[in-house]
Image (tube, coloured by chain):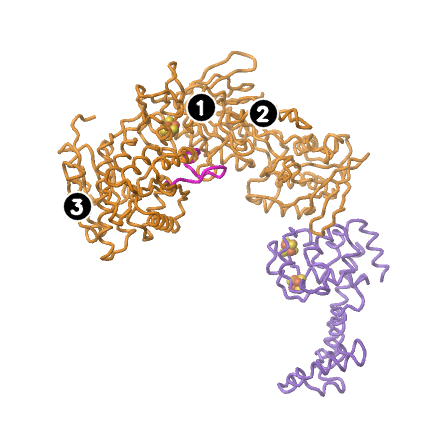
Chain colours: A purple, B orange
Amino acid sequence: MSNANEQMAARYKNNFLKEIEEQAEMGEWVKMCMQCGVCSGSCPTNFHPGWDHPPQEIFMMIRAGKREEVLTSNSMWMCTSCYNCYVRCPRKLPITHIMHGIAEYAYRLGVAPKFQPTLHLSQTFWNNCTKTGRVNEVKLTQSLYFKDGFMAGIKKGLEMKDVALGLVKAKRLNIMEALGGGHKCKDIKGIQAMLAKAKELEAKRKAAKAAA
Amino acid sequence: MAAEKKHAAYICSGCGLGERLDIAALEAAAKKEGKMQVVKTHAFLCSAEGVAMIRNDIDNDGVTHVAICACSRRAKTEAFNFPTTAISRGNLREGVIWVRPDTDEARETTQEMAEDYVRMACAEVKAMTQPSGNPNTGMNKTLLVVGGGMSGMTSALEAAKAGYKVVLVEKTGALGGWAAKLYKRVPTREPFKAPQDNGVADLVAQIEADANIKVYLNSTLAKTAGAPGRFKVDIAMESGPTVTEDIGAIVQATGFSLYDANKLPHLGYGKSPHVVDQAGLEELARAANGGVMKRADGKEVKSVVFVQCAGQRDATGEHLSYCSGYCCNTSVKQAMYFKDANPDVDCVVLYTDLRTPGNGEDFYRSAQNKGVIFSKGVVSEVVPGGNACTVKFHDLILDDKAAQIEADLVVLATGVVPNSGVNIDAVPAAPAEATEGAAPVVEEKPISILNLDYRQGPDIPQFKFGFTDSHFICFPYETRRTAIYTAGPVRRPMDIAQAQEDATGAAMKAIQAMENAGLGKAAHPRAGDLSFPTARLEGCTQCKRCTVECPFGAIDEDEKRFPLFNESRCRRCGTCMGACPVRVISFENYSVNTVGAQIKAVNIPDEFSEKPRILILACENDAYPALDMAAMNRNEYSAFVRAIPVRCLGSVNTIWITDALNSGYDGVMLMGCKHGEEYQCHFVKGSELGRYRLSKVGDTLKNMNLEAERVFDLEVAITDIDTLPRKINDYAAKIQEIGMSPFKGF
Ligand code: SF4
Ligand code: SF4
Ligand code: SF4
């Protein structure tokens, strides 16, 4: 995978903006940012200390050619998809989508931060729901709680106990899903075939861009 | 003028006046103290019937002087329009009933107020004559435009289109000015996405085809003498004789020069041919003519950096502190020269704020779309290398102080310096400083542009940063020289589109001024006023106060060193009248007497009445309208004040204040506009001069043994509708606290 990264770096030399424009989804919008900072001011995750760069900065770093720093940043992964910035940007940049586009590109190149919780969640969620065509909440929760070890999982579970019981009472959570495969959609094969086809199409499109 | 005078007072009982006031007592006041020969009341004076009643008295009963006691002088001016008759207005509606509560306790003081205003209106009109108009009119209707750039050409064409003859004088050998040097200009039309033709050729062709416009190239003004409507202008041609043209009004559109980039060695200018200013880039662009952009050494430019605010918006005081107003858009345009010829050229614009007025926002976006990179940063240094320059800057977004870019070419967006001629107010530099200073500043003496044959100096007075003074808050084209208008970047920084709009406006104002001059009428702000100042020279002590103080340079000196009024240069502000220590200057309808008589007409109750009297002298342009509007909002204020509108604070003669205090007024409020750098005075310097003069009133107060607070100078803006009544009341309370004046009853 890191081969892909080196290839791309070599191909675009010092024009990282062009790389993002051509390779990352929605990347062509980055140049239109006018550095007003409204997005950064609007972003709820900006209040978190763990967040490196708000969108405005990410866009500026792209223009300044800070390739390594941008692609390995956790910032794009911290985006909660709240769409605050998206609706407020005076230049109408689809910021949320750009953030995701860059994140996905970094992942594709294999340089996205390892052990990044959002990245982990995305992957777990995807695997979980594509398996049966439906999300198995119990299993999804389990795999998230226990990702940092057994004891940590138990602890987290106890913490969330009341919420879980509430959900059960309201028939929003079925503990029995933990056993067996849980409920499924009617045509798992169909769903999976559809997803496979979509993946194939997207991979083809991206490969074509990468090869161009 | 009719020899026989007949005075009449008309009292209106409409608009609630009849219900709130004792009209019979008002009539009695007009008759007894007002000494009016005719006194009539009408229930609806501004109605056709009421107006016809007055008309009839004027036409058939020999009435020559009319005191209308109804609403403010600013209301119903169309109804009460009797051009041949002297008119005064007693302000009973806005001045009395609308600012007083309708209560039993208030009735008595409200009535007193109304009776005083009736007496004042009668006294004023008796001291007035209806002005007959300036006899020294100048009938010339030719417009002189100085400067053949975009602004000048536009003024000339617009005036010619309106049917006026134009003389256009251009210093260089060709029309077009700066714009002619541009390869292309910032777009003016939808979709505002690409640079467009500079438009010069088209305007030049229009001028050449216009029989109304006479062009003098390679020419300057050797002398401008006379006054609006009758200027005599000597035009000196580089090779050839000096010709004299008769001119009605003048538009000065002398534009700007670029700030000298040689003053920016830290940005590499002068050290490398690959650092150019915006004019230098236009030259390269014209050479490329749409092809790939090449530098001076013929190398194709692959990367270019634009440095915004080079030597502008500088807080250190070393360079220009202001913004040129156009160079962000120009850099956007110039970056497109590169991108349009070759999209692979790296174009970076380093800016602190990108200011793209008008539709520049679309243009900016278009440049971003074309791949121009805009980075927020402050450039500290440009280091010219052998083949490329290194631009060092502080990246403000990433807070990277050591950021740098390499570029084949660097373009500096330097600012503008107005070509405004000689600064006539410049204080000659003290010679002591020159010896001390490490690097003595060599001031080049600018050459006069207009060469005005005015006592006050050869050019238009200047304002901040050497731009010509124009009433920038309210009347942007008005200068302090009547019928001489400045337009375009000589007045303030602006781009071509704004300059052309400006030039059109100035041409229209100039036409208006010529027309008014021909009719013997004043120009802005008392447009159409027929009155003009005259001096009783027998009493004149030749102190020169009037000549010096006139904000508009209207007064010269005659051979015997007496003031010589150029009525058509005069704006009728009355500053000369306020300044004159022996009070020999007056207007037919506004004089030391017209106001003095009103001050005397007020009934001053005795010391034990607990009814102080406060005189308000209110500027008619801002303070008086503010009082009227406060009244429309029914913002109440003290019944102890008596307001008299004055043309300008500058026209206030100190005698009014001494007389008022001597006759027992307890306080005097002076209401005038803001002065200083952000002045709002319609007469520019009037309120400042008035305030300066009145600041000396303290001595008078001391001599009279009166408290300093008895005279109060208040700065009023037309918007002070809510605060003004409050301030009046505060002052009234203060006066009651100080106690009554000991001068009553003398
Ligand atoms: S709100 Fe839009 S234009 Fe402003 S900094 Fe963010 S992305 Fe850029
Ligand atoms: S959508 Fe993402 S980047 Fe935008 S404000 Fe929300 S969390 Fe921040
Ligand atoms: S001071 Fe005012 S009124 Fe007097 S001459 Fe000058 S412009 Fe006219």
Q: Quadrant of residue A149?
A: bottom right
Using the rendered image, report if marks 3 and 2 lie on a common chain: yes
The main secondary structure of the magenta stretch is loop
Rendering coords of residue B53 (x, y %):
16, 40
Question: Residue B430 has which mark?
Answer: 2
Which quadrant of the figure has residue B348?
top right
Query: Label 3 vs label 2: CA separation?
Result: 68 Å
Camera-near label (1 vs 2) is 2
The amino acid on which the numbered mark 1 sits, given as a three-letter code, is Asn
Question: Which residue is painted at 19% across and 53% down in the image?
Answer: B19
Say whether residue B338 is left or right of residue B498: right
Evaluate if marks 3 and 2 touch, with contact meaning CB atoms under 8 Å apart. no
- Above or below, B359 relative to B554: below
Real-space Cα separation, disc 3 to disc 1, in angstroms:
55 Å
Does residue A141 show up? Answer: yes
Nearer to me, B331 or A212: B331
Front-lying residue, B384 or B580:
B580
Query: Is B123 drawn above or below residue A136 in the view shown?
Result: above
Which residue matches tag 3? B42
Q: Is mark 1 on a helix, strand or loop?
A: loop
Element under disc 2 = loop
Crowding near the residue tagged with mark 1, few <14, some 14–19, many ≥20 C-alpha atoms within 10 Å: some
Q: Name the spot of residue A190 as percent of width and height, x first.
A: 73, 76
Ligand 1 located in image quadrant: bottom right
Question: Tag on residue B230?
Answer: none
Q: Which numbered disc, 3 or 2, marks the residue that appears first in the sequence?
A: 3
Residue B455 falls inside the magenta stretch: no
Q: Can residue B515 be seen in this snapshot?
A: no
According to the picture, the residue beneath numbered tag 1 turns out to be B212
Q: How crowded is mark 3: few (under 14 residues within 10 Å), some or many (20 or more)?
A: some
